[in-house]
Amino acid sequence: MNESGSGSGNEGEPYRAIRARYTEETVTVYQAYRPEIGGPAARTGRFPPAWRRERMTWIKPSFLWMMYRCGWAAKPDQETVLSIEITRDGFEWALRHACLSHYDREVYPDEAAWKRELARCPARVQWDPERDLRLRPLPHRSLQLGLGGEAAHRYADEWITGIQDVTPLAREIHALVEKGELSAAGKLLPAERPYPAGDDLLAHLRA
């Protein structure tokens, strides 16, 4: 069962860490789109022309944070939840070329230094509270990774190895949560575990 599925946080969790479903070659991230984008993407394994490359696109390794963001696939323009397999090389390239999405005085010497990084980097990192099955915040933080410019193009054209529509899974888990069957719901969660991101990947994003 996913660590986040128990309904409460784990005291031993690092405050900021990447938890994801991954293999030796790929890592799973989640996004939610309106059906006109999500449907074709799942069928073809590529985003359709309606997907705008010039916009910042945010990917989430955490399934439950995606459920929080899209309201279990109920929010407008987020009715189709996609599970997207991308190469670990691509994912790690984005982390190495990322800066924080907001100024943090513990990471950057001053706001001007952060703004220079913001202008230079094609990727953004945001640490948001992880969620439990009832979508309540947990004590530790989950990674959201924003891709823009070169990173967005690499994501769409080079990194994606497969796309699956997991909306039915989201709705099945939500139905169990609504009935109070948290144990059964937790067993259906994607198996996420700490991603082996060493200091070479994250040191520039942490205090």
Image: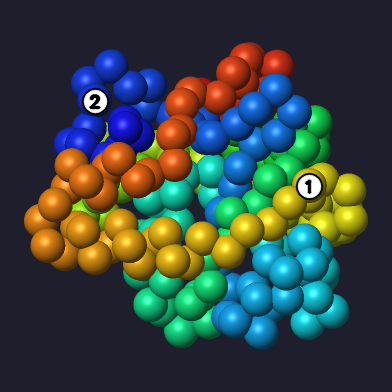
Q: Position of residue 37 (x, y in %)?
A: 68, 78
Camera-near label (1 vs 2) is 1
* Label 1 Cα crowd, 10 Å radius (few <14 / some 14-19 / many 20+): some
Q: Is residue 88 above or below residue 69?
A: above
Q: Please give the name of the residue rendered at 68% of the width and 66% of the height, measured from the top-left corner.
A: 42
Front in this rendered view, residue 14 or 168: 168
Q: Is residue 140 visible?
A: no
* x 89%, y 48%: residue: 158
Describe the element under mark 2 as helix, strand or loop.
loop
- Whether residue 67 is visible, yes or no, is yes
Considering only vertical position in the picture, is 50 above or below 146?
below
Amino acid, disc 1: Thr
| Residue at the disc numbered 2 | 10
Disc 2 residue crowd, few under 14, some 14–19, many 20+, Cα 10 Å: few
Q: Amino acid at mark 2?
A: Asn
Disc 1 designates what residue?
161
Q: Of the residues under marks 1 and 2, which one precedes in the sequence?
A: 2
Measuring from the top left, give residue 148's x and y in whole percent: 77, 58
Residue lying at 69% horizontally and 57% vertically, measured from the top left:
163
Toward the viewer: 137 or 28? 28
- Residue 198 location, x and y as percent? 62, 15
